[in-house]
Image (tube, rainbow, N blue to C red):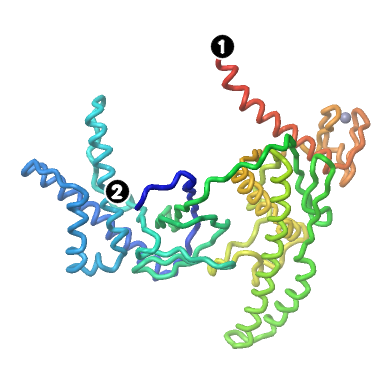
Amino acid sequence: MGARPPDVMIRSYKFRMYPTSKQDDLLRVMLDDHRFLYNAALQERRDAWTRSRVGIRFVDQDAQLKHIRAFDPDYARWSAAAETQTLRRLDKAFQAFFRRVKAGGKPPGYPRFKGAGYFDTVDHRNGLGATWDSHPTQSRVYFKGVGHVKVRQHRAVVARRITRIAVKREGRHWYVVLAAEQDVPAPLPKTGAAVGIDLAIGANGLAYTSLGERIGNPAYGKASRVRLAAAQQAWSRTKLGSSRRRKARERAAGVHRKIHNQRRDYLHKVARRLVAVYDVIVAERLTIAGMTRRAAPRPDGAGGYELNGGSAKTGLNRSILDAGWGMFLEMIRAKAESAGREFIQVEPAYSSQTCRKCGHTESANRNGKDFLCLSCGHRDDADINAAINILRAGLALRDTAQAAPREAFLS
Ligand SMILES: [Zn+2]
């Protein structure tokens, strides 16, 4: 591993994995074997020290690995580089221990043996018995000894290259954690402009800005939905297990993929434009998952609409999915981050019920698309009124954050 050039930064991505039940078993065995290796290496270091005051180093233990692997198929079945990582992990625990000893103070904890359930991560090197490999609709990650495991990739991985791939167990779930090398972004020149965004629903479009701009939602879904419905109907008329059924399913999946890609391209374009024009972008904080009550993702990781059951969504649900709010905000956040822009999210409480002129808050102020303040009589477009409130809330939040250190000096 060479030194990292100064224009590269590391970002990590964590995705849920959906192993088959056989792969699930293998992943457990992998964790266990690595845990035994860790404990055995710890034992060796302890024994050598207590018996003969010999300090065993990482390089000594790492050199033994290939002999162990030559004789023990239990270890040979996993990535050798990952086993080296596990030994390195023990070494790091020892280095931290020695540092604490040197520093004195409270008695330092000697590295401990890991019990079952206390060893949940195996770190792999990309390309050495582990490969991150994804395509537009389905992602998989390969681990030597386990095979290609399905991954639900909920955001795009931006990377010059992936360096590390870790297997992680959390409760009953499995995750893959990637370390991605990214270019350090070159900040865009300042424009001095700030904008608030009120997310809209269905026919209202995608969003409104505090400057009164309506951002449309081409809802590619609507046009393609006819084709999708036809594809689903064709599918439902086929016999279980028939090759016609498989083909009909593939056709429907193809339509899904196309809708998804078109929507994503459009959102990318809008997000790019917002980030180019504004230094500060403020939007609501969302809890999309709770809002749409989307069906659980299919184990094939395809995401998006479901062929079974998921199509029985209400109009509102479908519109929310169409607009892809979550995807949109995520894109703005990522692009703002790389361009050195500020993206602020505020709690949406009352932003649509509060009068931007006098501050009077009442749910009756808003009537669909119309805003009429029952206190001062101010009339407005309800979404634009909300977008302005959102912008103000964001700027206030920002001022408080920036003012805090100064106030600390005054006291
Ligand atoms: Zn008012």
Q: CA distance from mark 2 to mark 1?
A: 45 Å
Name the element at disc 1: loop
Outermost residue, left direction? 52
Amino acid on which the number 2 mark rests in the picture: Arg
Q: Nearer the viewer, residue 402 or 373?
A: 402
**Residue 257, x across and y down, in percent:** 65, 69
Give the mark nearer the N terminus: 2 vs 1.
2
Name the element at disc 2: helix
- The quarter of the image holding the C terminus is top right
Q: For mark 1, what is the residue?
A: 411
Q: For mark 2, what is the residue?
A: 89
**Residue 271, x across and y down, in percent:** 70, 50
Residue at 73% over, 74% down:
228
Amino acid on which the number 1 mark rests in the picture: Ser
Q: Nearer the viewer, residue 79 or 152?
A: 79
Residue at 88% over, 46% down:
369
User: Mark 2, residues whose alpha carbon is within 10 Å: few (<14), some, or many (≥20)?
Assistant: some
